[in-house]
Image: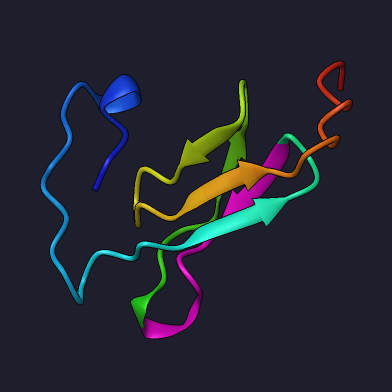
């Protein structure tokens, strides 16, 4: 499921196929490779602007941990 704010559209998630992962991170800059291996995708860098971001390839959602994210100036 792609992020409609980034791509302009949001396909419907497919149960058992579309990850529903919500991964807590401590930095506004993170990366995603879809888990690697044969089911992965190219590694992409993601910047969390508010509190979360969804990977445009695999739909994993990265959530900024409470009290984290003071690295926005980098």
Residue at 27% across / 41% down in the picture? 2
Residue 14 x/y as whole percent? 13, 63
**Is 25 on the left-hand or right-hand side of 19?**
right
* Viewer-closest of 42 and 34: 34
Q: Give the range drawn in magenta.
A: 29-38
Residue 66 figure quarter: top right
Left or right, 49 with respect to 33, comes to right
65 in the magenta segment: no
Side of 30 where 44 appears, left or right: left
Residue 33, image x, y percentages: 51, 62
Image quarter of residue 23 = bottom right
Residue plotted at (41% across, 71% down): 40
Query: Measured along the vertical axis of the image, is residue 55 above or below residue 68?
Result: below
Residue 22: percent from left, percent from top:
51, 57
Question: Is 35 part of what is drawn in magenta?
Answer: yes
Residue at the top extreme of this rendering: 73
Check the image and report above or below for 69 versus 32: above
Residue name at image x 17 percent, y 35 percent: 10
């Amino acid at each position: 499921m792609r992020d409609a704010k980034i791509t302009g559209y949001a396909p419907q998630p497919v149960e058992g196929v579309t990850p529903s992962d919500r991964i807590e991170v401590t930095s506004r800059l993170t990366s995603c490779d879809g888990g690697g291996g044969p089911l992965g995708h190219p590694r992409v860098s993601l910047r969390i602007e508010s509190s979360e971001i969804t990977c445009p390839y695999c739909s994993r959602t990265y959530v900024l941990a409470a009290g984290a994210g003071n690295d926005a100036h980098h």
